[in-house]
Image (tube, coloured by chain):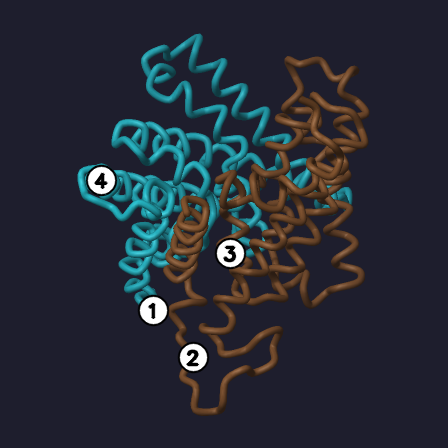
Chain colours: A brown, B cyan
């Protein structure tokens, strides 16, 4: 019944990869994936918050009364989000400006709260850290993949480096809001297709 | 007055919180399967967002700013929103049971609706005055409701259509949202 540590990690990469398998955390996914760089930055921030909050929730799980647990989770998460916010402001200011309000909004990212509630509150500390890390890495992979797709077609670059010749006409639809929804939908359907084969 | 109307139109249509700024997508996907739930959620968001928008503005202006506590904004705002939602829920249950029945189950969901938190942060970042924040809070919420109801209408029709297997459920919903977003995209440059 009990999964090994490796399994806990791997499940975040495919079986429960957000935002495809767990349809949570859509807002940052759609909003920050205009480029690979933004996606990666957001992903790393989420990994940090997820690992730390999972760890703390798991440590405190016997102390937190179950009636007020959601409020406690939110306070814990908000604390780490502020840490990330200040760190990014200090070391990666350009990225901080680009991600804008989406950094404080990690607080209401349902992936983080969802893992605290569904996993960390019921499991030991090592498992919770591994789970947070796995889900976080999975989330980052999704963001980077979506970011790559949109950046390559939408602005003809990858990590800011042009990939097509000068004659390439950027497909602006992809980096605008409608493109985000359609891309995510199509990627999800491709995953379903791969699953059902 | 004209300025406020312009601001309202820009928030409802041009910068629609859902379809142009991507905030509040989780409840958007979750509660849009039926028209009734979509209307309930829309109303609940309008109700809470107007209150949250004004209270967070006041807290920012009279507590966080004077005491140089801006770095605590995230935690302060989320706590305000969470406790506000709880309070509204208790208040409605006691005094307006009819409304509570309508909004009841959607209220707890609003705490993690990033549209609410997002609008509060936008109000601060754009340095709106109190009245402007009230207008934007209401119009962003109205825009959210509008998009949600429109989307629910489309989604009810999609249920009857034959959709390719891999695209079923969430995938087709996202593509439909993309189309709807394209329609709202046409408002860009209007204001």
Residue B105 in the figure: left or right of residue A141: left
Residue indicated by mark 4: B153
Coordinates of residue B97 in the picture (x, y in percent): 36, 10
The residue depicted at 43 percent of the width and 91 percent of the height is A167
The local secondary structure at tag 2 comes to loop
Tag 2 subunit: A
The local secondary structure at tag 4 comes to helix
How many angstroms separate mark 1 from mark 2 (CA)?
21 Å
- Can residue B3 be seen at all in this image of the molecule? no
Pointer 4 and pointer 2 on the same chain:
no
- Up-down relation of residue B61 to residue A98 (above or below): above
How many angstroms separate mark 1 from mark 4 (CA)?
27 Å
Q: Nearer the viewer, residue A91 or B95?
A: A91
Pointer 4 and pointer 3 on the same chain:
no
Mark 3 is surrounded, within 10 Å at the Cα level, by few (under 14), some (14 to 19) or many (20 or more) other residues, namely: many
Residue indicated by mark 1: B189
Residue lying farthest to the top in this orientation = B94
Residue indicated by mark 3: A31
Coordinates of residue A190 in the picture (x, y in percent): 42, 54
- Up-down relation of residue A153 to residue A24 (above or below): below
Mark 1 is surrounded, within 10 Å at the Cα level, by few (under 14), some (14 to 19) or many (20 or more) other residues, namely: few
The local secondary structure at tag 1 comes to loop
Tag 3 subunit: A
Question: Answer yes or no: do the residues labelled 1 and 4 have beta carbons within 8 Å?
Answer: no
- Up-down relation of residue A56 to residue A161 (above or below): above
Question: Answer yes or no: do the residues labelled 1 and 2 have beta carbons within 8 Å?
Answer: no
The residue depicted at 43 percent of the width and 11 percent of the height is B93
Residue indicated by mark 2: A170
Coordinates of residue A79 in the picture (x, y in percent): 75, 38
């Amino acid at each position: 019944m009990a999964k090994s540590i490796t399994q806990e990690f791997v499940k975040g990469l495919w079986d429960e990869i957000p935002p495809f398998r767990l349809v949570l955390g859509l807002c940052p996914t759609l909003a920050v994936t205009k480029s690979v760089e933004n996606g990666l930055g957001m992903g790393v921030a989420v990994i940090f918050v997820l690992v730390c909050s999972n760890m703390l929730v798991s440590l405190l799980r016997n102390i937190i009364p179950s009636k007020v647990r959601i409020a406690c989770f939110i306070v814990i998460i908000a604390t780490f989000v502020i840490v990330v916010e200040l760190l990014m402001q200090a070391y990666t200011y350009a990225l901080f400006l680009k991600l804008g309000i989406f950094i404080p909004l990690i607080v209401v990212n349902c992936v983080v709260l969802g893992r605290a509630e569904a996993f960390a509150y019921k499991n030991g500390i090592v498992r919770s850290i591994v789970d947070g890390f796995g889900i976080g890495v999975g989330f980052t992979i999704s963001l980077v993949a979506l970011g790559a797709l949109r950046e390559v077609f939408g602005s003809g670059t990858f990590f800011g480096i042009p990939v097509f010749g000068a004659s390439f006409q950027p497909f602006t639809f992809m980096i605008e809001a409608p493109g985000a929804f359609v891309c995510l939908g199509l990627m999800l359907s491709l995953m379903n297709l791969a699953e059902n084969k | 007055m004209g300025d406020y109307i312009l601001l309202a139109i820009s928030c409802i249509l041009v910068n629609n919180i859902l379809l142009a700024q991507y905030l509040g997508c989780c409840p958007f996907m979750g509660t849009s399967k039926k028209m009734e739930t979509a209307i309930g959620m829309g109303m609940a968001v309008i109700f809470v967002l107007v209150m949250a928008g004004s209270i967070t503005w006041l807290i920012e202006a009279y507590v966080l700013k004077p005491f140089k506590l801006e770095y605590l904004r995230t935690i302060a705002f989320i706590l305000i929103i969470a406790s506000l939602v709880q309070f509204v829920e208790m208040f409605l249950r006691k005094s307006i049971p009819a409304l509570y029945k309508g909004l009841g189950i959607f209220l707890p969901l609003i705490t993690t609706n990033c549209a609410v938190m997002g609008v509060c942060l936008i109000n601060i970042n754009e340095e709106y005055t109190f009245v402007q924040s009230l207008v934007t809070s209401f119009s962003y919420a109205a825009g959210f409701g509008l998009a949600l109801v429109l989307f629910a209408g489309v989604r009810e029709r999609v249920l009857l259509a034959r959709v390719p297997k891999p695209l079923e459920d969430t995938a087709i919903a996202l593509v439909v949202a993309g189309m709807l977003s394209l329609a709202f995209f046409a408002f860009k440059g209007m204001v």
